[in-house]
């Protein structure tokens, strides 16, 4: 079931123009330089979405578990690059490969845009999973559904750590499957596919606020994770090297 992405209405900054581009289930919001040719960029993004979807769909015809498995599948060195990235990230995080799809697509499309249009910075959001390649600091707020903390916490991203992925899993928001019941588990990694896979993996383990500290201990032990935020109802836990700020109403 489609859920309107009302949180997108909260993001605005005059250093960017914003484009919404969708194709079937893939629905992107792209922030880039306001001088970029919007119509040509939108066509390029849509063509990139179609190309990536075709690669993954064709691969799944020969290996159906790529779409259906909730656990890692074996590596395939003959697979398309985008598929290999999803399989690899999922194996590291110990989830199924589709857990990495939104972050992986966001990063791949971001890299294609940068190569084609020579943009200095851009942000690609794909269903709440974000790839950032920025030249100035940026704040990313965390949407957590009906939690009183939703859109009250912002992660400060500085250009020295970019590009990177900031991805969120939820057991209460959106259509993606989760074993957990967290309002939001947000993970930042240099690789967006890995951030997406880890967000799913740790989101699966947060069923109540009592799970937060145990999960944070495992997050803290993983050097690939730059930062993390867990929100369960009115409970908040933060871990990592980035600044988090409270957003005033």
Image (tube, rainbow, N blue to C red):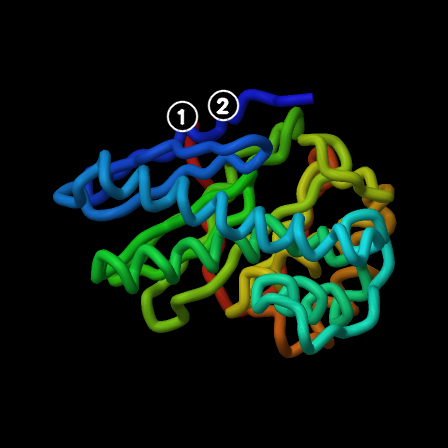
Q: Residue at x 63, y 22 (%)?
A: 2
Question: Is residue 229 in view from this perspective?
Answer: no
Is residue 125 rendered to the left or right of residue 184? left
Residue in the image at 69% along x and 58% along y: 197
The numbered dot on residue 6 is: 2
Q: Position of residue 157 (x, y in %)?
A: 40, 59
Q: Is residue 74 above or below residue 71?
A: below
- Residue 120 location, x and y as percent? 22, 61
Q: Secondary structure at mark 1?
A: helix
Residue 134 or residue 39, whichever sits in front: 39
142 to the left or right of 111: right
**Which residue is nearer to you in this view: 69 or 180?**
69
Please rate how many residues cluster around mark 2, counting C-alpha atoms within 10 Å: few if below 14, some from 14 to 19, many from 20: few
At horizontal 74% and vertical 62% (from top left) the residue drawn is 216
Residue 9's tag is: 1
The quarter holding residue 174 reads top right
Q: Which is nearer the eye, 195 or 19?
A: 19
Residue 246 x, y percent position in the rendering: 47, 43
Alpha carbon distance from label 1 to label 2: 6 Å
Would you say the residues marked 1 and 2 are in contact, meaning their CB atoms lie under 8 Å apart?
Answer: yes
């Amino acid at each position: 079931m489609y859920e309107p992405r009302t949180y997108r209405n909260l993001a605005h900054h005059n250093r960017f123009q914003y484009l919404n581009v969708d194709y079937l289930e893939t629905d992107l919001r792209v922030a880039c330089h306001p001088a970029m040719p919007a119509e040509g960029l939108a066509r390029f993004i849509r063509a990139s979405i179609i190309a990536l979807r075709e690669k993954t769909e064709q691969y799944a015809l020969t290996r159906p578990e790529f779409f259906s498995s909730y656990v890692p599948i074996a590596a395939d060195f003959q697979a398309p690059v985008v598929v290999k990235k999803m399989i690899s990230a999922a194996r590291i995080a110990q989830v199924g490969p589709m857990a990495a799809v939104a972050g992986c697509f966001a990063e791949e499309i971001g890299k294609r845009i940068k190569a084609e249009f020579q943009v200095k910075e851009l942000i690609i959001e794909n269903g709440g999973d974000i790839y950032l390649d920025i030249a100035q600091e940026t704040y990313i707020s965390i949407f957590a559904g009906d939690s009183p903390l939703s859109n009250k916490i912002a992660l400060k991203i500085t250009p020295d750590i970019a590009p990177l992925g900031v991805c969120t899993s939820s057991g209460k928001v959106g259509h993606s499957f989760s074993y957990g019941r967290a309002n939001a588990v947000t993970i930042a990694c240099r690789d967006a596919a890995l951030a997406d896979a880890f967000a799913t993996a740790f989101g699966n383990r947060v069923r109540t606020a009592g799970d937060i500290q145990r999960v944070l201990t495992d997050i803290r032990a993983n050097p690939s994770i730059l930062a993390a935020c867990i929100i369960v109802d009115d409970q908040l836990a933060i871990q990592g090297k980035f600044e988090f700020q409270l957003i005033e109403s």
